[in-house]
């Protein structure tokens, strides 16, 4: 288990030397001399899947950016639970990593997005657990000087999910919100945003300690959904299995259940007679954070503005060098971490 706990705030970050000064050459030639120019292939370090649920730092080819992509030198990245699911059976050619913060070392060829030298946060398709990654400029936002890159790295997937859940829920002023699986990164963002919007929030956290920051944000916390006292106007459910069934039972017939995950990996089973004896008419809305009328870059800029305005505070439960990524994966799978885990790319 990871013992260090670092809470939110402007955490210090570290930048590697510039991209131009750090090529590493792989060669098929023998001996100590450099290979001929046409034999040189630039490489960098990246975290790759080596076995189910296992990662290690290896040499990979440098990313080649498309015209609409900027090349970013990664200072820090966040590990998400969904990535641990993919690591159970890694797809061929896939490398993990969606959330990142760093510095643009080569601007997009089409002229879009931030210039070289800009500090950015981004949400990549994959492969962001690396020294460098190519990212669509539509998925990047410039980070204000007052926000550290380690803080920004905790934003993308969890922050985007929370922000878009809030949009889906609509006005929450005076309404009762039930949130399951609340002690992770998404949960901390949802609770702070929802209480700030005037909601009465009941948050389900696995332990009393993991719910500490949620209570500071104004939520009532319980350690089991069975202890949540309904009715609720809005339920946000991400655990699945029995948790979903019990949360639905507590949702008012005029309310809404927003189903945005199944972290337990347990399927949901409905009993017809339980259904008609419970919340008849309360719709269940499947939710995917990837469906949005706003680009990832636009919404990341909104989240950064909320941090700058002191209205959002990323909860960083672990801040470690990227060499400790395997430890973080194990703790995430065991549900031992509170908030987000951020890894710093430090040589």
Image: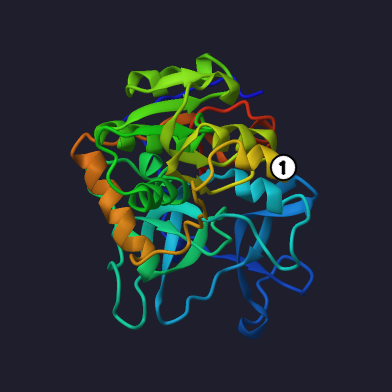
Identify which residue is drawn at 42% across, 62% down: 72
* Quarter of the image where the N terminus is located: top right
103 displayed left or right of 235: left
Q: State which quadrant residue 220 falls in.
A: top left
101 displayed left or right of 309: right
Residue matched to label 1: 271
Of 159 and 70, which appears nearest the observer?
159
Of 229 and 214, which appears nearest the observer?
229
Q: Can residue 8 be seen in this view?
A: no
Percent x, y for residue 83? 63, 50
Percent x, y for residue 317? 49, 28
Q: Is residue 123 visible?
A: yes
Residue farthest left in this picture: 309
Q: State which quadrant residue 272 falls in.
A: top right
Of 53 and 33, which appears nearest the observer?
53
Identify which residue is drawn at 69% across, 49% down: 85
* Quarter of the image where the C terminus is located: top right
Disc 1 on helix, strand or loop? loop
Percent x, y for residue 44? 59, 61
Q: Is residue 103 above or below residue 41?
A: above
155 displayed left or right of 283: left
């Amino acid at each position: 288990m990871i013992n260090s706990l670092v809470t939110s705030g402007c955490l210090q970050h570290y930048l590697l030397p510039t991209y131009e000064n750090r090529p590493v050459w792989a060669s098929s030639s023998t001996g100590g001399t450099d290979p001929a120019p046409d034999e040189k292939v630039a490489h960098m370090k990246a975290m790759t899947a080596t076995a189910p649920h296992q990662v290690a730092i290896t040499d990979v080819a440098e990313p080649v950016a498309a015209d609409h992509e900027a090349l970013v030198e990664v200072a820090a990245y966040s590990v998400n639970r969904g990535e641990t699911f993919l690591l159970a059976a890694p797809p061929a050619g896939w490398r993990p990593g969606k959330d990142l913060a760093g510095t643009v070392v080569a601007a997009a060829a089409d002229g879009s997005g931030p210039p070289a030298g800009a500090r950015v946060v981004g949400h990549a398709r994959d492969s962001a657990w690396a020294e460098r990654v190519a990212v669509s400029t539509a998925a990047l936002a410039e980070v204000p000087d007052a926000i550290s890159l380690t803080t920004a790295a905790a934003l993308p997937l969890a922050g985007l999910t929370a922000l878009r859940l809030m949009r889906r829920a609509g006005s929450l002023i005076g309404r009762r919100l039930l949130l399951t699986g609340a002690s992770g990164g998404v949960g901390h963002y949802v609770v702070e945003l929802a209480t700030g919007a005037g909601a009465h929030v009941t948050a389900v956290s696995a332990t009393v300690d993991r719910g500490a920051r949620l209570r500071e944000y104004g939520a009532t916390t319980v350690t089991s959904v069975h202890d949540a006292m309904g009715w609720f106007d809005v339920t946000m459910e991400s655990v699945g299995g029995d948790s979903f069934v019990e949360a639905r039972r507590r949702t008012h017939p005029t309310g809404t259940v927003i189903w945005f995950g199944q972290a337990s990996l347990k399927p949901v089973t409905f009993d017809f007679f339980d259904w008609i004896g419970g919340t008849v008419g309360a719709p269940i809305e499947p939710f995917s954070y990837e469906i949005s009328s706003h680009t990832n870059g636009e919404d990341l800029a909104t989240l950064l503005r909320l941090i700058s305005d002191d209205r959002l505070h990323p909860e960083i439960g672990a801040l470690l060098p990227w060499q400790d990524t395997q430890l973080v994966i194990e703790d995430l799978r065991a549900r031992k971490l509170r908030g987000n885990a951020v890894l710093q790319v430090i040589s």
